[in-house]
Amino acid sequence: MQSPETAAGAQRQLSVATYNIHKGFSFMPLLARRPVLHALREELRTLNPDLVFLQEVVGEHATHAARHRDWPVESQYEFLADSLWQSHAYGKNAVYDAGHHGNAMLSRYPITHWDNEDVSSHRFERRGLLHCEIAVPGWKDPLHCVCVHLALTARGRGLQLARLRQRIERLVPAGAPLIVAGDFNDWYWRHRATHELAHPLNMHEVFELFRGVPARSYPALLPVLRLDRIYVRGFTVRDARVHHGRRWGRVSDHAPLTAKLELARS
Protein backbone atom coordinates (compact mmCIF):
# COMPACT_ATOMS: atom_id res chain seq x y z
CA MET A 1 0.00 0.00 0.00
CA GLN A 2 1.24 3.49 -0.84
CA SER A 3 1.96 5.91 1.96
CA PRO A 4 0.01 9.24 1.93
CA GLU A 5 3.21 10.99 0.87
CA THR A 6 3.75 8.59 -2.04
CA ALA A 7 0.14 8.80 -3.14
CA ALA A 8 0.18 12.60 -3.01
CA GLY A 9 3.43 12.67 -4.98
CA ALA A 10 2.04 10.30 -7.62
CA GLN A 11 -1.07 12.44 -7.98
CA ARG A 12 1.05 15.39 -9.05
CA GLN A 13 2.33 13.50 -12.11
CA LEU A 14 0.69 13.90 -15.50
CA SER A 15 1.57 12.48 -18.92
CA VAL A 16 0.45 14.20 -22.12
CA ALA A 17 0.67 13.62 -25.87
CA THR A 18 -0.08 15.75 -28.91
CA TYR A 19 -0.68 14.20 -32.31
CA ASN A 20 -1.88 15.34 -35.73
CA ILE A 21 -3.50 12.12 -36.98
CA HIS A 22 -3.87 13.08 -40.67
CA LYS A 23 -7.63 12.32 -40.60
CA GLY A 24 -6.94 8.65 -39.92
CA PHE A 25 -5.24 7.92 -43.26
CA SER A 26 -1.74 6.62 -43.85
CA PHE A 27 0.92 9.05 -45.05
CA MET A 28 3.27 6.44 -46.57
CA PRO A 29 3.10 6.41 -50.43
CA LEU A 30 2.37 2.67 -50.75
CA LEU A 31 -0.52 2.98 -48.29
CA ALA A 32 -1.89 6.29 -49.52
CA ARG A 33 -5.57 6.97 -48.77
CA ARG A 34 -5.81 3.82 -46.68
CA PRO A 35 -7.44 4.08 -43.24
CA VAL A 36 -5.10 3.24 -40.37
CA LEU A 37 -7.33 4.04 -37.40
CA HIS A 38 -6.99 0.60 -35.81
CA ALA A 39 -3.19 0.78 -35.94
CA LEU A 40 -3.30 4.37 -34.74
CA ARG A 41 -5.39 3.41 -31.71
CA GLU A 42 -2.92 0.68 -30.78
CA GLU A 43 0.02 3.07 -31.08
CA LEU A 44 -1.74 5.62 -28.87
CA ARG A 45 -2.28 2.89 -26.30
CA THR A 46 1.45 2.14 -26.23
CA LEU A 47 2.13 5.80 -25.38
CA ASN A 48 -0.49 5.54 -22.60
CA PRO A 49 -0.78 9.28 -21.77
CA ASP A 50 -3.30 10.75 -19.34
CA LEU A 51 -4.24 13.47 -21.83
CA VAL A 52 -4.19 13.42 -25.63
CA PHE A 53 -4.35 16.55 -27.80
CA LEU A 54 -5.47 15.51 -31.31
CA GLN A 55 -5.61 17.47 -34.55
CA GLU A 56 -7.19 16.63 -37.94
CA VAL A 57 -9.80 14.39 -36.34
CA VAL A 58 -12.80 13.39 -38.44
CA GLY A 59 -16.07 13.68 -36.57
CA GLU A 60 -18.14 12.35 -39.47
CA HIS A 61 -17.54 11.48 -43.13
CA ALA A 62 -20.29 9.68 -45.06
CA THR A 63 -18.14 8.98 -48.13
CA HIS A 64 -15.31 7.33 -46.18
CA ALA A 65 -17.81 5.33 -44.12
CA ALA A 66 -19.40 3.96 -47.29
CA ARG A 67 -16.11 3.25 -49.08
CA HIS A 68 -14.05 1.60 -46.31
CA ARG A 69 -15.35 -1.52 -44.56
CA ASP A 70 -13.31 -0.98 -41.41
CA TRP A 71 -14.37 2.66 -40.97
CA PRO A 72 -15.69 2.97 -37.38
CA VAL A 73 -19.39 3.52 -36.73
CA GLU A 74 -18.61 6.14 -34.09
CA SER A 75 -16.56 9.32 -34.55
CA GLN A 76 -12.78 8.99 -34.74
CA TYR A 77 -12.27 10.56 -31.32
CA GLU A 78 -14.75 8.16 -29.71
CA PHE A 79 -13.13 5.20 -31.49
CA LEU A 80 -9.64 6.26 -30.34
CA ALA A 81 -10.78 6.99 -26.78
CA ASP A 82 -12.39 3.54 -26.43
CA SER A 83 -12.23 2.49 -22.76
CA LEU A 84 -8.87 4.08 -21.95
CA TRP A 85 -9.86 7.76 -22.01
CA GLN A 86 -13.28 8.03 -20.43
CA SER A 87 -13.77 11.75 -21.14
CA HIS A 88 -13.43 13.52 -24.47
CA ALA A 89 -14.32 16.74 -26.27
CA TYR A 90 -14.44 17.62 -29.96
CA GLY A 91 -14.20 21.01 -31.64
CA LYS A 92 -15.82 20.96 -35.08
CA ASN A 93 -13.88 23.33 -37.36
CA ALA A 94 -14.18 22.37 -41.03
CA VAL A 95 -17.67 21.42 -42.26
CA TYR A 96 -18.33 20.04 -45.76
CA ASP A 97 -21.02 18.05 -47.58
CA ALA A 98 -19.77 14.63 -46.45
CA GLY A 99 -19.05 15.56 -42.83
CA HIS A 100 -16.62 17.55 -40.69
CA HIS A 101 -13.28 17.48 -38.87
CA GLY A 102 -11.46 19.44 -36.17
CA ASN A 103 -9.51 19.05 -32.92
CA ALA A 104 -10.21 16.68 -30.03
CA MET A 105 -9.16 16.09 -26.44
CA LEU A 106 -9.07 12.66 -24.76
CA SER A 107 -8.71 12.53 -20.99
CA ARG A 108 -8.53 9.96 -18.20
CA TYR A 109 -10.01 12.61 -15.91
CA PRO A 110 -13.38 14.37 -16.19
CA ILE A 111 -13.62 17.24 -18.66
CA THR A 112 -15.94 19.51 -16.69
CA HIS A 113 -16.28 22.30 -19.26
CA TRP A 114 -15.19 22.86 -22.84
CA ASP A 115 -15.54 25.44 -25.59
CA ASN A 116 -14.38 25.71 -29.19
CA GLU A 117 -13.56 29.24 -30.37
CA ASP A 118 -13.54 29.88 -34.11
CA VAL A 119 -10.28 31.64 -35.03
CA SER A 120 -10.34 31.02 -38.80
CA SER A 121 -8.35 33.62 -40.73
CA HIS A 122 -10.31 32.96 -43.95
CA ARG A 123 -13.15 30.71 -45.12
CA PHE A 124 -10.91 28.22 -46.94
CA GLU A 125 -8.97 27.18 -43.82
CA ARG A 126 -11.16 26.66 -40.77
CA ARG A 127 -9.40 26.69 -37.40
CA GLY A 128 -10.51 26.59 -33.76
CA LEU A 129 -9.20 26.70 -30.19
CA LEU A 130 -10.55 23.74 -28.22
CA HIS A 131 -10.37 24.86 -24.57
CA CYS A 132 -11.10 22.27 -21.86
CA GLU A 133 -11.19 22.44 -18.07
CA ILE A 134 -10.22 19.13 -16.50
CA ALA A 135 -10.78 18.01 -12.90
CA VAL A 136 -7.66 16.09 -11.86
CA PRO A 137 -8.29 14.34 -8.52
CA GLY A 138 -6.63 16.11 -5.61
CA TRP A 139 -5.80 19.33 -7.49
CA LYS A 140 -7.27 22.49 -5.98
CA ASP A 141 -7.53 24.23 -9.36
CA PRO A 142 -8.91 22.83 -12.62
CA LEU A 143 -6.36 22.08 -15.32
CA HIS A 144 -6.83 24.27 -18.40
CA CYS A 145 -5.92 22.68 -21.73
CA VAL A 146 -6.10 24.25 -25.19
CA CYS A 147 -5.72 22.07 -28.29
CA VAL A 148 -4.69 24.02 -31.39
CA HIS A 149 -4.00 23.60 -35.10
CA LEU A 150 -2.85 26.92 -36.49
CA ALA A 151 -2.95 28.31 -40.02
CA LEU A 152 -0.53 27.53 -42.82
CA THR A 153 0.09 31.22 -43.52
CA ALA A 154 2.25 33.45 -41.33
CA ARG A 155 -0.45 36.14 -41.23
CA GLY A 156 -3.10 33.64 -40.15
CA ARG A 157 -0.88 32.20 -37.43
CA GLY A 158 -0.12 35.67 -36.10
CA LEU A 159 -3.81 36.50 -35.78
CA GLN A 160 -4.54 33.15 -34.12
CA LEU A 161 -1.66 33.45 -31.65
CA ALA A 162 -3.03 36.85 -30.62
CA ARG A 163 -6.53 35.39 -30.14
CA LEU A 164 -5.12 32.47 -28.16
CA ARG A 165 -3.12 34.79 -25.89
CA GLN A 166 -6.18 36.99 -25.31
CA ARG A 167 -8.32 33.96 -24.49
CA ILE A 168 -5.85 32.70 -21.89
CA GLU A 169 -5.47 36.14 -20.34
CA ARG A 170 -9.25 36.46 -20.12
CA LEU A 171 -10.29 32.97 -18.97
CA VAL A 172 -7.36 31.20 -17.28
CA PRO A 173 -6.48 32.34 -13.72
CA ALA A 174 -2.81 33.17 -13.30
CA GLY A 175 -2.35 30.43 -10.70
CA ALA A 176 -4.15 27.66 -12.60
CA PRO A 177 -2.11 24.91 -14.33
CA LEU A 178 -2.15 25.32 -18.11
CA ILE A 179 -1.16 23.22 -21.15
CA VAL A 180 -1.39 24.44 -24.75
CA ALA A 181 -0.46 21.82 -27.33
CA GLY A 182 -0.96 20.90 -30.96
CA ASP A 183 0.19 21.61 -34.50
CA PHE A 184 1.41 25.21 -34.58
CA ASN A 185 2.73 25.06 -38.17
CA ASP A 186 5.46 27.32 -36.75
CA TRP A 187 8.41 26.09 -38.78
CA TYR A 188 10.34 29.36 -39.17
CA TRP A 189 13.66 29.54 -37.36
CA ARG A 190 12.56 32.25 -34.90
CA HIS A 191 9.74 30.17 -33.34
CA ARG A 192 7.06 32.82 -33.34
CA ALA A 193 4.74 30.95 -30.97
CA THR A 194 7.36 30.97 -28.22
CA HIS A 195 7.97 34.71 -28.48
CA GLU A 196 4.39 35.89 -29.12
CA LEU A 197 2.49 33.42 -26.94
CA ALA A 198 4.63 31.63 -24.39
CA HIS A 199 6.93 34.39 -23.16
CA PRO A 200 4.16 36.97 -22.50
CA LEU A 201 2.18 34.32 -20.57
CA ASN A 202 5.15 32.89 -18.62
CA MET A 203 4.80 29.54 -20.40
CA HIS A 204 7.56 27.18 -21.50
CA GLU A 205 7.82 24.70 -24.35
CA VAL A 206 8.83 21.29 -23.02
CA PHE A 207 11.50 20.52 -25.65
CA GLU A 208 12.96 24.02 -25.40
CA LEU A 209 13.51 23.34 -21.70
CA PHE A 210 15.14 19.97 -22.44
CA ARG A 211 17.11 20.65 -25.63
CA GLY A 212 16.96 24.39 -26.25
CA VAL A 213 14.70 24.13 -29.33
CA PRO A 214 11.28 22.63 -30.16
CA ALA A 215 11.29 19.04 -31.42
CA ARG A 216 11.47 18.12 -35.11
CA SER A 217 8.14 16.43 -35.75
CA TYR A 218 7.44 16.51 -39.50
CA PRO A 219 7.48 14.34 -41.53
CA ALA A 220 7.20 11.43 -39.10
CA LEU A 221 9.50 9.11 -41.07
CA LEU A 222 12.47 11.47 -40.79
CA PRO A 223 11.46 14.73 -39.07
CA VAL A 224 12.91 17.99 -40.35
CA LEU A 225 10.39 20.72 -39.43
CA ARG A 226 9.48 21.80 -35.87
CA LEU A 227 5.70 22.08 -36.27
CA ASP A 228 4.26 20.56 -33.09
CA ARG A 229 4.61 21.95 -29.57
CA ILE A 230 3.65 21.41 -25.93
CA TYR A 231 3.62 24.64 -23.89
CA VAL A 232 3.07 24.48 -20.13
CA ARG A 233 2.64 26.75 -17.12
CA GLY A 234 2.65 25.62 -13.50
CA PHE A 235 4.55 22.39 -14.18
CA THR A 236 8.04 20.94 -13.91
CA VAL A 237 8.96 18.96 -17.03
CA ARG A 238 10.36 15.52 -16.16
CA ASP A 239 10.67 14.09 -19.68
CA ALA A 240 9.92 14.98 -23.31
CA ARG A 241 10.10 12.69 -26.32
CA VAL A 242 9.35 12.72 -30.05
CA HIS A 243 8.24 9.37 -31.53
CA HIS A 244 9.31 9.01 -35.15
CA GLY A 245 10.52 6.50 -37.71
CA ARG A 246 8.88 3.91 -39.96
CA ARG A 247 6.56 2.64 -37.23
CA TRP A 248 5.02 6.08 -36.76
CA GLY A 249 5.31 7.16 -40.38
CA ARG A 250 2.83 4.49 -41.43
CA VAL A 251 0.00 6.04 -39.38
CA SER A 252 0.46 9.81 -39.84
CA ASP A 253 2.62 12.44 -41.48
CA HIS A 254 3.32 14.01 -38.05
CA ALA A 255 5.29 12.41 -35.23
CA PRO A 256 3.56 12.41 -31.84
CA LEU A 257 5.16 14.30 -28.96
CA THR A 258 4.90 13.18 -25.33
CA ALA A 259 5.86 14.80 -22.04
CA LYS A 260 5.86 13.80 -18.39
CA LEU A 261 4.92 16.69 -16.15
CA GLU A 262 4.80 17.31 -12.41
CA LEU A 263 2.54 19.91 -10.90
CA ALA A 264 4.66 22.67 -9.39
CA ARG A 265 4.27 23.12 -5.65
CA SER A 266 2.63 26.36 -4.67
Image: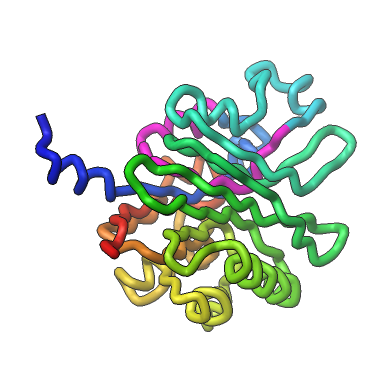
Relative depth, front residue between 196 and 145: 145
State the image quarter where residue 25 is shown. Answer: top right
Total number of numbered labels? 0
Is residue 51 highlighted in magenta? yes
Measured from the top left, where is residue 46 in percent x and y?
A: 36, 35
- In the displayed structure, does residue 222 sit left or right of residue 27? left
Q: Quadrant where the N terminus lies?
A: top left
Residue at the (51%, 40%) spot, across then down:
250
Placement of 135 over or under 223, stated as above or below = above
Quadrant showing the C terminus: bottom left
Q: Which residue is drawn at 49% across and 62% down?
A: 229
**Please, which residue is most extreme toward the front here?**
140
Residue 47 versus residue 78 in the image, above or below: below
Q: Where is residue 34 in the image (x, y as percent from the top left)?
A: 64, 32
Q: Where are the magenta residues, as a range?
A: 38-59
Instruction: Say whether residue 85 is magenta.
Output: no
> Is residue 75 in sight in this rendering?
yes
Looking at the image, is 171 positioned above or below residue 165? above
The residue at 43%/48% (across/down) is 17
Q: Which of 235 and 250 is in front in this view?
A: 235
The quarter of the picture where residue 233 lies is bottom left
Residue 97 percent across, percent down from the top left = 89, 36
Residue 81 at x, y = what percent? 51, 30
Q: Which residue is drawn at 44% across and 37% down?
A: 109
Q: In which quarter of the image is residue 205?
A: bottom left
Display coloring? rainbow
Residue 127 vertical position relative to residue 106 in the rendered view, above or below: below
Q: Relative to residue 136, is residue 61 drawn left or right?
A: right
Q: Can residue 28 be seen in this view?
A: no
